[in-house]
Amino acid sequence: MDAARPVMKAPPTRSFVGRYFDYIGHRWLALLRTIRGVGSFALITLGVTVTKFGHSTRVIHPLIGSQIRRAGVRLLPMVFFLGAALGLVIIGQTVALLTRVGAQQYIGTVMNTVVFRELGPLAAAMMVLGRVGTATVVELGTKRAQGEIDALEALGIDPVHYLVVPRVIGLGLSIFSLTIYLILVVMLSGMLFAFLTDVPISPTEYFGQIANGLTYQDFGFLAVKTILFGTIIAVVTCYHGLAQPIRLEQVAEAATRAVSQSVTGCLILDAFFILLYVVLSAK
């Protein structure tokens, strides 16, 4: 009977190329699921913000103020230190180099491009993400794991209106304000470096070049970009902490995913604005 038993063959092993394409396929499917989930959550948040903006103002407005203090006011010392360091190390040396080669007329263009358009908004957004974004995932993920979100829903309280909307508005306003503060500190510290190193440029010429390089379009794009940075960070971090079932041991992994996806979203948005600047400058 043993001789008549069919011989079981081992399943064929996949080649390295096959396993690689399987991995790529799984990663793309996971990316598409994440984009769909975050996009749906963003639309829900937008709908709740529009339809319930005037509801429960005595509760929501203090929560917005709390988020502004948390993501904005408490970061002012850190932003001041970063702005002073960037102004002394980067901007001051750039001004000194341009003055040395007789290209003072490009100071405004350099400051506008490097600080006003790119460095200021991104630096402020990354600081808020590192300080507040991870804490948001941990806080909301813990609430979700311990059943507090279900308790809010049982009481008839919309978790998106109560927990997400104040963060979206608060982080957007905070990043916008911190960006303006950071830009001012960078400009002043850059002028201080020029003064300490005896760069032959007067404060009037320095600030005049910067003012001449700015347009109303730059201020508008700065406001829109920074508010969208805050929206991306708030929506992504709230999504990973709130919008799906999670256990306590999964909170740290969710925070890591939220940070990486927030950085990716901010960089994609920044690249879009760069293309927009290029298109508008070419006209």
Image (cartoon, rainbow, N blue to C red):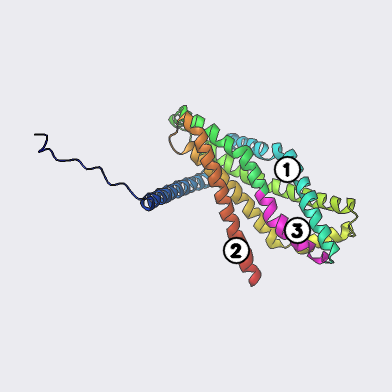
Residue 275 is tagged as 2
- Label 3, on which residue? 111
Residue 37 visible in the picture: yes
Q: Where is residue 112? Give x, y as percent.
A: 73, 59
Give the magenta part as a residue range.
Answer: 103-122
Whether residue 103 sits left or right of residue 35 in the image: it is right
Mark 3: amino acid: Met
User: In the rendered image, which quarter contains the C terminus?
Assistant: bottom right
> What is the crowding at mark 1: few (fewer than 14 residues within 10 Å), some, or many (at least 20)?
many
The verdict on residue 89 being magenta is no
First in sequence: mark 1 or mark 3?
Answer: 1
Q: Residue at x 50, y 37 (%)?
A: 254
Gap in angstroms between the C-alphas marked 3 and 2? 19 Å
Gap in angstroms between the C-alphas marked 1 and 2? 28 Å
Mark 2: amino acid: Leu
Q: Which residue is drawn at 49% across and 41% down?
A: 239
Q: Tags 3 and 2 in contact by the CB under 8 Å rule?
A: no
Whether residue 266 sits left or right of residue 185 in the image: it is left
**Dominant secondary structure of the magenta stretch?**
helix
